[in-house]
Image (cartoon, helix red, strand yellow):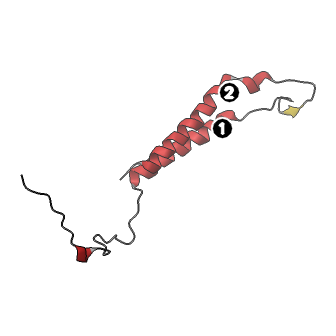
Amino acid sequence: MSKKTNKFSASDFGKETEVQQEGTFYFGQQNFKWMLIGLAFIVVGFLLMMGSDANTVDGKLDPNAWNDGIFSIRRIRIAPLFVVIGFVIEVYAILKRK
């Protein structure tokens, strides 16, 4: 068995062995693609949450009316799911290596 030796010596201590190139960018084309997909999910989620308020009838405020549409499956379940999926995709896009 041969003994492993490092290629560094005491005289190399404190010197940079690898010079980083100026102008290198961490994100590649795939990162930006995933970021746009995540942003689209977030925007769609917020658009799905939009709609009339609890006290509106045909777009007009009526304090005596109640609109049960604010508790629809689209607003309560589907839209927040799209937003959370969008944020997960954004985290993936940021952490993905080139």
Please, what is the three-letter code of the amino acid marked with disc 2?
A: Ile
**Residue 76: image tag:** 2
Q: Residue at x 51, y 45 (%)?
A: 90
- On the image, numbered disc 1 is attached to which residue? 47
Residue 87 or 8: which is nearer the viewer? 8
Q: Say few, some or many: other residues with alpha carbon within 10 Å of mark 1 (under 14 / 14 to 19 / 20 or more).
A: few
Q: Residue at x 83, y 33 (%)?
A: 59
| Dot 2 alpha-carbon crowd within 10 angstroms: few under 14, some 14 to 19, many 20 or more | few
Where is residue 43 shown, x and y percent of the image?
Answer: 61, 42
Whether 34 is drawn above or below 25: the answer is above
State the SS at label 2. helix
Quadrant of res 84: top right
Secondary structure of the residue carrying numbered label 1: helix
Say what amino acid the circle numbered 1 marks.
Answer: Leu
Is residue 37 shown to the viewer in this render? no
Pinpoint residue 13: horizontal percent, then vertical percent.
29, 73
Taking 98 as reference, is 19 above or below it? Answer: below
* Image point (49%, 48%), residue name: 35
Horizontal side of residue 87 vs 67, given as left or right:
left
